[in-house]
Image (tube, helix red, strand yellow):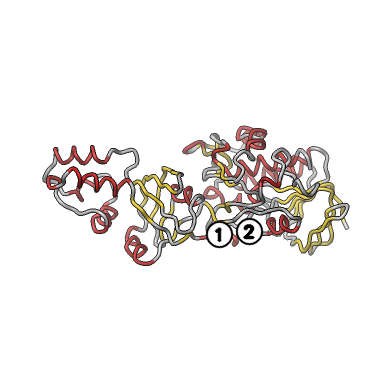
Amino acid sequence: MKNYDVIIVGAGAAGLMCAIEAGKRGRAVLVIDHAEKAGKKILISGGGRCNFTNLHTEPTNYICNNSRFAISALSRYTPYDFLALVEKHAIAWEERNHGELFCVESAGQIVAMLLAECESAGVSLQLNCTIQAVSKNDQFQLETERGMFRADSLVIASGSRSIPKMGATGFGHQIANQFGLNVTELKAGLVPFRLTGGEQERLRALAGISLDVSVSCNGHSFREQMLFTHRGISGPAVLQVSSYWGEGDTVSIDLLPGTDGFSWLSRMREERPGAALRTVLAERLPKRLVQYLCESLIRDQTLRRLSDTEIETVEESLHNWQLKPAGTEGYRTAEVTVGGVDSNELSSKTMESKKVEGLYFIGEVVDVTGHLGGFNFQWAWASGYAAGQFV
């Protein structure tokens, strides 16, 4: 049986960051993961370039039952703190839209950086190691296929259910339940929508079309690109709003965000009265989409025949197109899991369970879910850093 001060379950972003910080404090740290390599989710993120943080990180970029929970950790470890670590390792980076930071070369550089920091801090790593049972008496005891391990502190950084083909499981939530902690309702987040029946058949002809839209659901709106797929709709705007969508909800799509449709069409009616509505719309929207709209939502006619009331109706159809998804693509393609270990069960300062001394939860396993664009990585770094100061 091997003894450590700290055992961290999960060699992902949060787990490795926690290990680095605990190791710097002279703690004997072991990181265990059932995967064959560390940082598998990091490696596929950002199209292989890793969107490792966002300069505009604020608590409002996160979904949590306790809206103030993430403030403490995020304020103590900022995007600039992680950027300093990236620059220390001479990793070239670039800023893209909305403050998103990416590696210029490869996400593998972030994993290599974290592993180098772990080595420097004396962290031990046990990969390809499945945990069979966890218990606690005076210490935490982990039974694994590689033997028995014990530690005073146990950190669960095992992620959540998103992308099971990458090895994602509900292990962390099972441990929370085992030790009497509440887990909030779970669902796939940052995930495409599926359509079914006639709606899917009609929209399938639009597959491949991408355009700038604003998508809204349950009081939350996001303006970015939307992509039509063979199964439904996707793209950043859709992924963002999916985290706020519930079964049976309708989403509203503004096809002309920021445009006064009534004024524009009224002006076109005066300047080009003989033009067909279809022709004018195709100057702002993809032709295949206009064809669908004219067949399903809008009556095509020459502009001179449009009354003000009819223009208002067209404008409403373009600014408030209602779609009712049959569901999402689920955890199979979801970038995150919404929900997790109840934040009210944890200390926002240390990430330690209020019920079980020495038991910590960090990263995606916790009920803190970021928007698209590097925010979930920043939560991983911040929560891992926070726990690392106390384990």
| Direction bottom: furthest residue | 197
Count of numbered circles in the view:
2
Q: Amino acid at mark 1?
A: Tyr
The answer to whether residue 220 is visible is yes
User: Mark 2 and 1 residues: CB-CB less than 8 Å, in contact?
Assistant: yes
Residue 166, x across and y down, in percent: 61, 59
> Which residue appears at 47% of the width and 60% of the height?
327
Q: Secondary structure at mark 2?
A: loop
Instruction: Determine whether, in the image, residue 139 is placed left or right of residue 283.
Output: right
Q: Nearer the viewer, residue 390 or 317?
A: 317
Q: Is residue 124 visible?
A: no
Please, what secondary structure does the residue beneath circle 1 have?
helix
Seen in the image, is 178 located left or right of residue 310? right
The picture places residue 183, in percent across and down from the top left corner, at 66, 54
Q: Residues within 10 Å of mark 1 (few under 14, many from 20)?
A: many
The type of residue carrying mark 2 is: Ala
Q: Which residue is mark 2?
A: 168
Q: Quadrant of the C terminus?
A: top right
- Identify residue for label 1: 331
